[in-house]
């Protein structure tokens, strides 16, 4: 039986209400704030943990991943805890051999043929990534409904590119050549990845995630027509799966100004935009039926407070108090960033938008 997807009505003073109301474009008491990679190296507490454990050990140890996820709430006063997990985690269970290096994930058995795709497994999240789900349960126990919990996953396109390229890339030439030249291999791979991601995001919601953000970090390399042919059908399946279990979703990408209308067709509730487009223009293009997330340039945090406040006010003025805005950077927090300035920014957004 399909779960009721009617947006839940939350108590007006519920700690999670501010964030969830924004996801559903309902009026809030103030604009919610969180930052991508908010538990990153700008936090001294996190750096201390990194001296003892590597990133993958932290991500695969629920007690550690939940501890890191909760730190920004205590330090910055953000409105959501985000799952500490690498977007590559679900593909490990598919039979992909990988390691995380300082330059990013490295795939030791890249996908190049139908035979390679056939060797991949479609695994259940409870079997492949139980540590992710246990981490969410621990976060939920820790914050007790005071803030929202954001689950995350890589999008099919971005994960497929990593699996084909074998690691980070600037032009994605190997992956895109396979996509154009061997569409039967591309579609077979995307089908399997999408099957895994759909189960993964639904399991996160069942474990206690309030909202899911899908990271399509590399999709800005495509034109709208290519996106619609090779990516959109699979992204639609992922967002439909999230909706099926009654959670809202955020659709993230960078360099996607040309793709906004196409990405909206994927079905996310909130479209995340970066600083390459003005927030008011982006919202006009995605339409009033979607919320919007963003879009302060994170490099602004390497300036002075008067400059940060000015740029913050510009974003808020473009949002114009409309329901559905989640304040964030256009991409992740840069290292180093002064944690005191991040705390001050959160407080300033809340004060400026208090209703």
Image (spheres, rainbow, N blue to C red):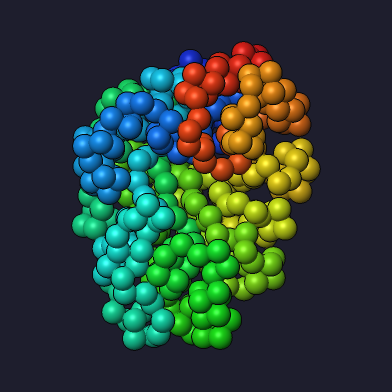
Image side of residue 116 versus residue 159, left or right? left
Q: Is residue 226 above or below residue 45?
A: below
User: Residue 185 placed where, x, y %?
Assistant: 45, 82
Nearer to me, 223 or 248? 223
Task: Decide if residue 327 is in sight here.
Answer: no
Image side of residue 310 versus residue 62, left or right? right
Q: How many marks?
A: 0
Q: Residue at x 41, y 36 (%)?
A: 40
Q: Which picture quadrant has residue 63? A: top left
User: Residue 187 placed where, x, y %?
Assistant: 48, 77
Nearer to me, 139 or 35? 35
Image side of residue 278 versus residue 72, left or right? right
Q: Residue at x 55, y 17 (%)?
A: 344
Q: Is residue 165 above or below residue 283?
A: below
Q: Which picture quadrant has residue 67? A: top left
Q: Which picture quadrant has residue 355? A: top right
Nearer to me, 130 or 17? 130
Q: Residue at x 50, y 65 (%)?
A: 169
User: Residue 55 placed where, x, y %?
Assistant: 30, 45
Task: Decide if residue 44 is in sight here.
Answer: yes
User: Residue 116 placed where, x, y %?
Assistant: 34, 81
Q: Is residue 327 above or below residue 107?
A: above
Q: Residue at x 36, y 79 (%)?
A: 117
């Amino acid at each position: 039986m399909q779960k009721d997807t009617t947006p839940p009505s939350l108590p007006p003073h519920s700690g999670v209400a501010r964030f969830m109301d924004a996801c559903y474009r309902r009026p809030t008491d103030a604009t919610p704030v969180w930052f991508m990679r908010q538990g990153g190296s700008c936090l001294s507490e996190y750096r201390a943990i990194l001296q003892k454990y590597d990133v993958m050990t932290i991500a695969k140890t629920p007690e550690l991943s939940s501890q890191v996820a909760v730190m920004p709430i205590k330090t910055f006063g953000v409105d959501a805890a985000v799952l500490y997990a690498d977007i590559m985690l679900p593909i490990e269970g598919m039979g992909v051999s990988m390691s995380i290096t300082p330059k990013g994930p490295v795939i030791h058995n890249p996908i190049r043929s139908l035979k390679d795709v056939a060797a991949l497994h479609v695994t259940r999240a409870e079997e492949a990534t139980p540590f992710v789900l246990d981490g969410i349960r621990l976060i939920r126990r820790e914050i007790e409904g005071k803030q929202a919990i954001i689950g995350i996953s890589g999008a099919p396109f971005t994960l497929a590119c990593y699996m084909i390229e074998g690691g980070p890339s600037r032009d994605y030439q190997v992956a895109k050549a396979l996509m154009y030249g061997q569409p039967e291999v591309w579609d077979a791979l995307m089908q399997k990845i999408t099957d895994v991601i759909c189960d993964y995001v639904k399991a996160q919601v069942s474990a206690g995630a309030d909202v899911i953000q899908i990271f399509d970090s590399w999709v800005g390399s495509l034109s709208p027509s290519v996106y619609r042919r090779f990516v959109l059908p699979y992204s639609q399946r992922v967002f439909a799966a999230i909706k099926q279990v009654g959670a809202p979703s955020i659709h993230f990408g960078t360099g996607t100004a040309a793709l906004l209308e196409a990405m909206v067709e994927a079905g996310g509730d909130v479209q995340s935009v970066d600083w390459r487009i003005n927030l008011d223009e982006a919202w006009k293009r995605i339409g009033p039926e979607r919320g919007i997330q963003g879009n302060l340039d994170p490099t602004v945090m390497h300036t002075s407070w008067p400059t940060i406040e000015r740029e913050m006010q510009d974003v808020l003025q473009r949002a114009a108090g409309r329901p559905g805005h989640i304040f964030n950077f256009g991409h992740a927090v840069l290292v180093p960033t002064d944690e005191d300035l991040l705390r001050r920014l959160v407080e300033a957004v809340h004060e400026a938008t208090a209703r």
